[in-house]
């Protein structure tokens, strides 16, 4: 399997070879995909792949929970017969990218390798240390809040009489100050300047008009002040169904601050260093034909399988811990068979198809950490 980035803008023999190799692979994949039958039986739990029906189910859940995403039909003539005509792919537009990947200054201390279940290959989860520190900070803040709340409650009980006396004194003072002082009234009611109001600093007279019509003394026009809106890079992100790999596939189309399309080289500035020029290629969008940067899906299935397995393992551990906690409170000793999950508990711990794209987008966020799209339930 070839995973070649086709963004060698510097030219030269290596760049030309990469582009040629990628072109050959694209032709091979197109032919192989044509002869690949549509997946009918679910292999989600065994291989991490999706059928077209499962892709639609997961997409409907994403659209329902994250309203920035929606289904799109694509161009006429590019409709895939194994997908509904109005649900060819998912897209979210104008997603901001405030920083470049290098700005995050990623290091080994802030990354973790999520391994593949079979051959040890995997993907890099970024900002692990930062996330752990954030969790610890939140936990410490919660403890401090509990202590502060307890102290506040104690103070409230001991200071009720003092507060009531203070309120009585304030009420007496208000009755004595019914007539306001005029000097204070003027100072307190001065109108502050509103940045949106018409100020004389923004008024300019047109000298050309003044010459033509000296009576009017020129036309008054307002110079619009500069706004405070920060213009950033934005991306249109789409998720397609790849029939050959039987997984979702991400396509990116970027714009600069002036809404001009980004070059492939510029797009690489928003890709994690572990993936730029390795698993990101430039290919025609299967439903739009316009060239997009794409995250190669060759490893998506095994990585998603491992992510789902870890999620299920975490869910099972949580249920077992809850059983142990309940037994401890009751003073009951648990036997090994008592820790076995019931059928209902096992079903609750199992990953559902409709959760697939949320986990998939979380995985993809490690590849494009600067693009702030929505994938939260």
Image (tube, grey):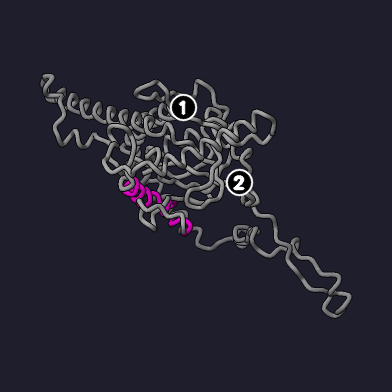
- Residue at the spot x=42%, y=25% of the render? 122
- Let me know if residue 278 appears in the view: yes
Label 2 neighbourhood size at 10 Å, few (<14), some (14-19), many (20+)?
Answer: some
- Let me know if residue 162 appears in the view: no
Answer above or below: position of 328 versus 203. Answer: above
The numbered disc on residue 232 is: 2
Q: Secondary structure at mark 2?
A: loop
- Could you say where residue 322 lies in the image, as x and y percent from the top left? 20, 28
The answer to if 141 sits in the magenta stretch is no
Front residue of this view, candidates 217 and 153? 217
Q: Quadrant of residue 39?
A: top left
- Could you say where residue 241 lies in the image, as x and y percent from the top left? 40, 45
**Cβ–Cβ under 8 Å for marks 2 and 1:** no
Left or right? Give the position of 160 relative to 232: left
The answer to if 74 sits in the magenta stretch is yes
Q: Which residues are magenta?
A: 55-76
Label 1 neighbourhood size at 10 Å, few (<14), some (14-19), many (20+)?
Answer: some
Answer above or below: position of 56 versus 212. Answer: above
The numbered disc on residue 124 is: 1
Q: Quadrant of residue 374?
A: top left
Separation of marks 2 and 1 at Cα, in angstroms: 26 Å
Q: Secondary structure at mark 1?
A: strand
- Residue at the spot x=54%, y=36% of the render? 24
- Could you say where residue 47 lies in the image, as x and y percent from the top left? 31, 32
Left or right? Give the position of 325 relative to 252: left
- Residue at the spot x=69%, y=33% of the render? 10
**Which quadrant of the rendered structure holds the C terminus?**
top left
Nearest to viewer (mark 2 / mark 1)? 1
């Amino acid at each position: 399997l070839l995973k070649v980035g086709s963004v060698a803008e510097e030219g030269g023999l290596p760049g030309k070879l990469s582009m040629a190799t990628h072109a050959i692979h694209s032709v091979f994949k197109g032919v192989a995909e044509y002869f690949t039958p549509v997946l009918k039986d679910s292999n989600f739990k065994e291989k991490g792949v999706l059928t077209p029906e499962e892709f639609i189910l997961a997409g409907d859940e994403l659209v329902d929970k994250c309203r920035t995403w929606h289904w799109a039909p694509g161009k006429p003539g590019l409709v895939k017969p194994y997908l509904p005509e109005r649900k060819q792919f998912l897209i979210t537009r104008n997603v901001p990218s405030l920083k470049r990947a290098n700005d995050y200054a990623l290091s080994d201390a802030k990354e973790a390798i999520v391994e593949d279940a079979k051959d040890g290959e995997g993907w890099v989860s970024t900002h692990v240390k930062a996330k752990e520190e954030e969790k610890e900070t939140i936990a410490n803040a919660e403890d401090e809040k509990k202590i502060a709340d307890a102290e506040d409650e104690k103070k409230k009980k001991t200071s009720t009489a003092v507060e009531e006396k203070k309120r009585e004194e304030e009420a007496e003072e208000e009755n004595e100050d019914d007539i306001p002082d005029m000097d204070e009234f003027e100072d307190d009611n001065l109108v502050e300047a509103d940045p949106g109001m018409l100020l004389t600093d923004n008024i300019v007279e047109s000298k050309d008009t003044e010459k033509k019509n000296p009576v009017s003394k020129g036309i008054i026009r307002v110079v619009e002040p500069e706004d405070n809106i920060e213009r950033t890079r934005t991306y249109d992100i789409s998720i397609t169904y790849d029939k050959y790999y039987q997984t979702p596939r991400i396509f990116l189309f970027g714009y600069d601050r002036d809404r001009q399309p980004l070059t492939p080289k510029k797009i690489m500035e928003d890709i994690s260093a572990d993936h730029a020029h390795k698993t990101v290629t430039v290919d025609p969008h299967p439903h739009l034909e316009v060239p997009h940067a794409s995250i190669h899906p060759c490893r998506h299935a095994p990585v998603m399988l491992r992510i789902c397995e870890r999620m299920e393992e975490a869910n099972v551990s949580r249920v077992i811990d809850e059983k142990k906690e309940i037994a401890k409170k009751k003073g009951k000793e648990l036997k090994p068979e008592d820790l076995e999950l019931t059928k209902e508990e096992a079903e609750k711990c199992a990953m559902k198809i409709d959760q697939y794209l949320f986990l998939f987008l979380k995985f993809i966020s490690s590849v494009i950490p600067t693009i702030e799209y929505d994938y939260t339930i």
